[in-house]
Image: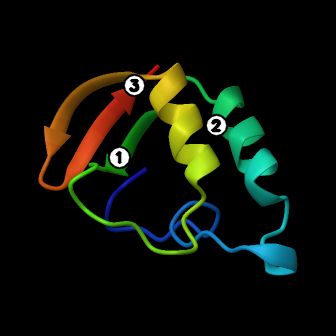
Amino acid sequence: MPLDKYNKNYDMFNRGNFGKDGEEGIIKDIESKENLVLLIKNDENSINWQHPKSITDYCKENYKKTGTVSIYDIYEK
């Protein structure tokens, strides 16, 4: 996904009833994608309180870290 485009399902996670399918829905969506590249803030930078740790953990456990860009770690399947 281009960095200069807004993607409502991934750019601002929401907790509670406001988040449509919740964390499990986002993980299922990520699982279904091919050739996906994920940018995740590295451990040296704090994340927003609404950021779902379960999604970050899933990505780190199931994707390979291939590099770093600024404050982000790059993960690929």
Disc number placed over residue 26 in the picture, else none: none
Q: Secondary structure at mark 2?
A: helix
Q: Which SS class for mark 1?
A: strand
- The amino acid on which the numbered mark 1 sits, given as a three-letter code, is Leu
Q: Is residue 1 above or below residue 7?
A: above
Q: Which residue is mark 1?
A: 39
- Vertical placement of residue 74 versus 69, above or below: above
Residue visible at 32% across and 67% down in the picture: 4
Counting residues from the start of the chain, the first of labels 2 and 1 encountered is 2
Residue 35 pos. (x, y %): 48, 24
What residue is pinned by disc 2? 30
Q: Position of residue 20 (x, y in %)?
A: 84, 67
- Count of marks overlaid on the render: 3
How packed mark 2 is, by other alpha carbons closer than 10 Å (few <14, some 14-19, many 20 or more), is some
Q: Position of residue 29 (x, y in %)?
A: 72, 40
3D distance between C-alphas at marks 2 and 1: 13 Å
Q: Amino acid at mark 2?
A: Ile
| Distance from the alpha carbon under mark 2 to that under mark 3 | 11 Å
Residue identifier under label 3 = 76
Residue 62 lies in quadrant: top right
- In this view of the protein, which residue sits in the foreground, 15 or 34? 15
| 7 left or right, relative to 73 | right
Nearer to us in this view, 27 or 36: 27
Q: Relative to 25, is 27 above or below?
A: above
Residue drawn at point x = 56 percent, y = 60 percent: 10
Label 2 vs 3, first from the N-terminus: 2
